[in-house]
Amino acid sequence: MRNHTWKLSVFASLLTLGFLAAPVCATDGSPEAQWVEGTLLIAWGTPLSVLDEASPIVASLRQDEGKMVHLELDEGLLAAVGGPMAAAGRLVRALIPVRDPVMGDAPVRPLAITAVGGVPEASETASGSYPYVSIMCQFQGNSSNLVSLSYFQGMYANVWPGLDHYWRRLSYGMVNVVGSSAVGWFTLPHTQAYYEGLISGTNYSIMLNALYNDCTSAASGSVNLSNYEGINLMFNDTFGPYAWGGWGGVTWEPPWGWGNVAVICHEMGHAFGLPHSNNADGDSSPYDNPWDIMSNSWGSAMSDGTYGTVGKHTITYHKDRLGWIPAARKAVVSTAGLYEFNIDHLTFAGTSNLHMVKVMIPGSTRFYTIEVRDRFGYDGNLPGFAVILHEVNSSRQEPAWLVDLVDPSNGGDAGAMWRPGECFEDAPNEISICVESITTEGFTVRVGYGDWGGIFDDGFEAGNLGAWSLVTN
Ligand SMILES: [Zn+2]
């Protein structure tokens, strides 16, 4: 029943992976680099503030017997193994410099990295029960923020804004977290300062690895991790400026993380394999798309008296990547023509109308997605009821960028919200997307694609600039 093929099983099955001791020799015959093979574990960091923050991402190669090689991967190296979504959990080989023993397990930048075999089949699909366990760990000599066990147990409830309720709503019933529980507090063997001292420049891999090992070890007599699909590690203080999620089912949460369930939602999204999305302002922050829990989880969000900021939905591109948009509820435009679609807002599971239209950009693997969002349910505090567009390039670190032509730094403005009478036009690619009318739960949208032999009647050809917008890529 379950299609996700790697989560906690990663930690057991990796034990069988071999270490390829195949040194690449320099001209003088001394080995200077070697290929290592293992499963690529990726984790994403989330800051407390949302603006003007670069997106930290860490990658580690887990070899046999759990041995970790921490890697410095930039966007180019990630693209070589399919981009961050496809790369997470993938068996890869990396050519790394032979270590000076003094380096210890410091992160290294691979000279090359290649995927072994294809993308794990359906590795991004999420369905069925994902029981999570929260393990609460306190730093040595630190007794702040020791919130009660019932708080952490209640966070998984199937009532708003509990995580079971939340993931069922986001996935249209395909995913739940039934069977989740919480244990703790347990005391870590080291102080907060010790762990923060493991941060290596801008690389957090060593610290995250130590926190994972020490917290799960501390809890080992109280919880059987093999009963769970994911682990939320809840710490009683901060460990650098970020919360983290990834590794196919692990999150690392400071108090401002577990005190705001939206952060747990965001990090669990990473654990499902989702990347960040972005707006189109070109800055380095991927936390500024207000339409996505996987970007700005703080703004335009609901809130709860107990669990703080509440998660919103993720964008249709992400839902589709996790297999939550069935074929009957999406359409792909890739041949010339004029098309009309009825699209319902993403919080609404009900009708047979669409949840996604994908418009391929000719001569590329890029595409636009069309979705509708409304101020309803977990999306109750979004900027408005509108058609929302993203331009998707799956090889970049944040594949989906919000289309917003008026003020790209403000993704909640009218420029991002397409309403009846407005058209988005990508003239070089002969793509037009026009919002026609409001329906019961969404909008009717017309897509003109290529040389389809008609003319628009919305003033576009007449040069009515108020009715359309132009983007060039
Ligand atoms: Zn994140």
Image: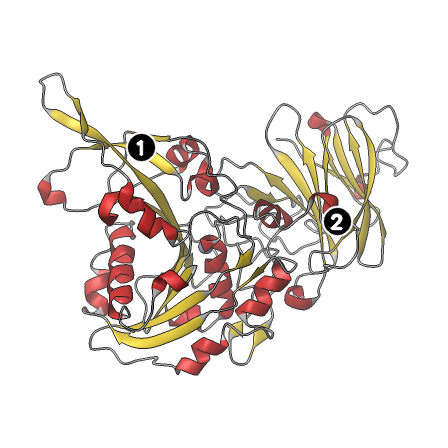
Q: Is mark 1 within 8 Å of ligand 1?
A: no
Q: Earlier in the sequence, mark 1 or mark 2?
A: 1
Please tell me which residue is depicted at 50% across the width and 69% down the height of the picture.
261
Drawn side of residue 157 relative to residue 221, left or right? right
Q: Circle 1 sits on which residue?
A: 93
- Residue 33 horizontal/vertical position (percent): 19, 28
Please tell me which residue is depicted at 41% across the width and 30% down the height of the picture.
117
Element under disc 1:
strand
Single out the mark in the foreground, 1 or 2: 1
Quadrant holding the C terminus: top right
User: For residue 134, what is the image quadrant?
Assistant: bottom left
Q: Callout 1, which amino acid?
A: Arg
Q: Image height check: is 8 above or below 178?
A: above
Q: Which quarter is ligand 1 in?
A: bottom left
In this view, the residue in front, 165 or 361, is 165
Q: For residue 191, which numbered disc appears in the image?
A: none
Drawn side of residue 454 relative to residue 396, left or right? right
Q: Callout 2, which amino acid?
A: Trp
User: Does any portion of residue 316 appear in the rendered image?
Assistant: yes
Q: Residue furthest front?
A: 1
User: For residue 430, what is the image quadrant?
Assistant: top right
- Residue 130 horizontal/vertical position (percent): 49, 61
Q: Image height check: is 24 above or below 39?
A: above
User: For residue 328, what is the image quadrant?
Assistant: top right
Element under disc 2:
loop
Asked which colour scheme the image uses, the reply is secondary structure
- Residue 264 horizontal/vertical position (percent): 47, 65
- Residue 272 horizontal/vertical position (percent): 49, 53
Q: Circle 2 sits on which residue?
A: 418
In this view, the residue in front, 181 or 368, is 181
Say few, some or many: other residues with alpha carbon within 10 Å of mark 2 (under 14 / 14 to 19 / 20 or more): many
